């Protein structure tokens, strides 16, 4: 077993200047094409992005988009002036060329509107199914959850797409919102996504990024707060196979007092050149007194030839915090766990299966959407069948 | 089934190369017999237990172990368990995210070669947990995660009763237990012993547990081998005199 673990308490960095909040811009010209040497790009194989990060043409979409409309929710595709007013509603000021291009150039926006005081009884599921990987495209989604509303939205990505997307989420005061993004793409998909949430006063926001498929998936899940008392739970589950690049970055920007962020990302890797990246950025600004933050990333390496990069990064500008911590661990199967299970008659493969399911179980329960729990469990099972459990089937 | 250990030699890998821990252990446990192995810390008791169970850390360099007519050392860890061996561990291992009930059902299915009948199984599990003073909600907890020392040991014995092996090796199942828990655990072991033809290898540092589980034979284990064998009176002698006689033969 090889385990590297770092659990450090807060106040390790007492820097004044932060690199986490550079000044953004809506003007595409302010964002040079990345070279790959930039901090935010250094892990991403740019070549495989097919120009999405640079100047790939945003072609007419080859990704079908369908959704259900539970009572109380308003969903529609809007364009023109109406779409323009939705650009940046989460407070997003682009830090990347592709985000700036999307806000400036994409003609339409998918708007999901939940009025104040509305409790939506079943999850809103938006199915995005890619039909043509040769089409480079981009999308903008705006979700507005009114004050004290309660809703779950699932973005379900399947098929083959080459797509860049910005998803903006506004969580009203006291609202309780869950946004789940499932990347269950075919092997050739390329997905470059930026999710930006603005969490209102005393609101509860949960974001779950679940990535299984695709040649390259990169998702940045960011949170800022629109007042004190907001709480954000950032969850991630990923399973990378041979050749896949799956990159998740989070940024919890504690810009208001008494806010909370809690991030848990767990991943499994198997097969040659499976590569995962997790970068957990947390910034606690001077005004953000009495906040609590914890972030954790765990990776389970199932075979040789994989690589998991895991980088927690906590920057603290005030000493008046309730709690801050992080943990990061990348390990192979624990021999002692396998021995214990096998000593009860359980075969090695079955023991490995139990351990991997156990690794993800708590997280899947935390996602808290019963209608997708079963699917996540069986997808984990299917991923295992590809490699670790091959001989069992 | 009879467990026969013959001239077993075992090494572990250390920074300075392999180190011999077991230096020729010979022991026969016939059906229905309970053998106590007593020895000072570091004498190799756990090494013996783990070697029988097949822990990958230990290298067998000589000797043999057979269960009935089967060559134990030729089997994988799980095969040994399915052949009828059980090891109650000194330090049971946490398995995050795997519930006790899932674990027990998976183990039972593996040992029997078929899934247990749901209705009787649930009843059996609840009864086993209850007899060991474990809360019925215990089944929903993750294996050994956050268990107290006593709960870990009681959980091991619940497994012993449910999985029903032929030979059980109990490695310091008594350590860390208060007197009430010790009684509960001993009763569990005695229920197992009362079944037809079961063998028990009871490893302990103290004579305390032998008041509740009466052994047929006692072996003093020192420096990787059996130094003396006898009946339960040997335990009484150890209680009175300790291990000094074996550790410093000159002073005896
Ligand atoms: N990796 C290792 N490197 C060096 N020595 C080891 C290693 N593993 C075990 N040993 C040694 O093997 C010996 C036997 O250990 P073992 O755990 O079998 O003893 P024990 O009789 O069960 O002791 P206890 O009563 O403390 O449980 C000890 O001296 C121990 O230090
Ligand atoms: Mg021991």
Image (cartoon, rainbow, N blue to C red):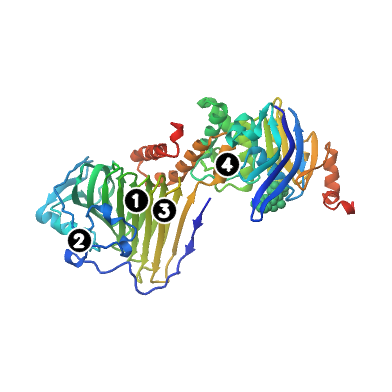
Q: Is residue B67 visible?
A: yes
The mark nearer the N terminus, 2 or 4, is: 2
Q: CA distance from mark 2 to mark 4?
A: 52 Å
Measured in 3D between alpha carbons, the distance from the residue under mark 4 to the one under mark 3, in whole angstroms, is 25 Å
Callout 3: SS = strand
Residue marked by disc 4? A339
Q: Which residue is mark 1?
A: A246
Between residue A329 and residue A76, name the one nearer to us: A329
Q: Residue B76's quadrant in the figure?
A: top right
Residue A64 position (above or below residue A245): above
The quadrant of the picture occupied by the C terminus of chain A is: top left
In the picture of the structure, the residue carrying the numbered disc 2 is A100
The quadrant in which residue B86 appears is top right
Q: Does residue B115 sit above or below A20 in this rendering?
A: above
Category of crowding for the residue at label 2, using alpha-carbon neighbours closer than 10 angstroms: few (below 14), some (14–19), many (at least 20): many
Q: Which mark is residue B161?
A: none
Q: Earlier in the sequence, mark 3 or mark 2?
A: 2
Is label 1 on the same chain as label 4? yes
- First reached walking from the N terminus: tag 3 or tag 1: 1
Residues at circles 3 and 1 in contact by the CB criterion of under 8 Å: no
Give neighbour class at mark 1: few <14, some 14-19, many 20+ (Cα, 10 Å): many
Query: Of the residues tagged 1 and 2, which is closer to the observer?
Result: 1
Cα separation, mark 1 vs mark 4, equals 31 Å
Task: Report the residue marked by disc 3.
Answer: A308
Q: x, y percentage for residue B85? A: 65, 33
For mark 4, give the secondary structure: helix
| x and y, in percent, of residue B112 in the image | 57, 27
Locate residue B100, reporting x and y percent: 53, 39
- B78 lies left or right of A258: right
Label 1 chain ID: A
């Amino acid at each position: 077993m090889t385990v590297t673990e770092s659990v450090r308490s807060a106040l390790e960095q007492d820097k004044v200047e932060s690199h986490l909040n550079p000044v953004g811009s809506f003007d595409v010209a302010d964002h040079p094409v990345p070279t790959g040497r930039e901090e935010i790009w250094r892990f991403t194989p740019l070549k495989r992005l097919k120009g999405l990060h640079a100047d790939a043409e945003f072609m007419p979409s080859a990704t079908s988009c369908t959704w259900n409309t539970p009572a109380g929710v308003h969903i529609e595709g809007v364009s023109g002036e109406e779409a323009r007013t939705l650009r940046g509603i989460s407070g997003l000021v682009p830090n990347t060329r592709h985000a700036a291009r999307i806000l400036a150039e994409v003609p339409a926006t998918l708007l999901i509107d939940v009025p104040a005081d509305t409790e939506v009884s079943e999850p809103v599921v938006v199915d995005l199914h890619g039909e043509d990987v040769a089409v480079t495209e981009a999308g903008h989604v705006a979700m507005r959850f009114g004050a004290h509303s309660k809703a779950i939205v699932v973005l379900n990505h399947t098929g083959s797409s080459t797509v860049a997307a910005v998803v903006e989420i506004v969580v009203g005061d006291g609202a309780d919102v869950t946004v789940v993004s499932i990347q269950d793409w075919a092997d050739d998909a390329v997905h470059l996504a930026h999710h930006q949430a603005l969490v209102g006063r005393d609101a509860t926001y949960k974001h779950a990024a679940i990535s299984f498929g695709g040649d390259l998936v990169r998702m940045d899940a960011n949170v800022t707060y629109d007042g004190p008392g907001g709480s954000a739970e950032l969850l991630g589950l990923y399973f990378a196979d041979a050749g896949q690049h799956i990159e998740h970055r989070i940024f919890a920007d504690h810009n208001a007092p008494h806010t909370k962020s809690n991030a848990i990302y767990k991943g499994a890797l198997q097969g040659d050149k499976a590569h995962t990246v997790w970068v957990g950025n947390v910034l606690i600004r001077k005004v953000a007194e009495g906040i609590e933050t914890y972030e954790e990333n765990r990776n389970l390496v199932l075979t040789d030839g994989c690589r998991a990069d895991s980088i927690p990064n906590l920057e603290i500008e005030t000493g008046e915090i309730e709690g801050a911590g992080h943990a990061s661990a990348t390990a192979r199967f624990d021999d002692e766990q396998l021995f214990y299970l096998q000593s009860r008659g359980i075969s090695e493969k079955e023991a490995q299966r139990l351990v991997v399911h156990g690794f993800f179980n708590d997280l899947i329960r935390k996602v808290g959407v019963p209608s997708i729990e079963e699917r996540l469990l069986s997808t984990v099972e299917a991923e295992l069948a590809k490699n670790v459990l091959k001989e069992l089937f | 089934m009879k467990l026969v250990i013959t001239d077993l030699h075992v090494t572990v890998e250390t920074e300075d190369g392999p180190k011999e821990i077991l230096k020729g252990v010979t022991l026969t446990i016939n059906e229905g017999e309970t053998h106590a192995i007593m020895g000072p810390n570091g004498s190799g008791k756990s090494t013996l237990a783990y070697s029988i169970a097949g822990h990958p850390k230990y290298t067998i360099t000589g000797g043999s172990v057979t269960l009935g007519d089967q060559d134990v050392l030729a089997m994988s860890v799980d095969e040994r368990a399915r052949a009828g061996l059980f090891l109650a561990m000194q330090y049971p291992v946490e398995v995050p995210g795997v519930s006790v009930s899932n674990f027990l059902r998976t183990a039972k299915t593996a040992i029997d070669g078929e899934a247990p009948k749901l209705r009787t199984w649930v009843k059996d599990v609840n009864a086993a947990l209850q007899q060991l003073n474990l809360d019925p909600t215990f089944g929903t907890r993750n294996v050994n995660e956050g268990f107290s020392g006593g709960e870990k040991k009681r959980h091991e014995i619940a497994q012993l009763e449910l999985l029903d092996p032929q030979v059980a090796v109990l490695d310091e199942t008594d350590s860390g237990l208060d007197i009430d828990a010790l009684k509960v655990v001993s009763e569990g072991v005695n229920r197992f012993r009362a079944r037809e033809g079961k063998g028990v290898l009871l490893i302990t540092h103290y004579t305390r547990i032998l008041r509740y589980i009466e052994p047929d034979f006692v072996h003093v284990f020192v420096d990787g081998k059996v130094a003396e064998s006898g009946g339960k009176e040997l335990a009484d002698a150890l209680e009175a005199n300790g291990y000094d006689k074996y550790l410093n033969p000159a002073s005896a």
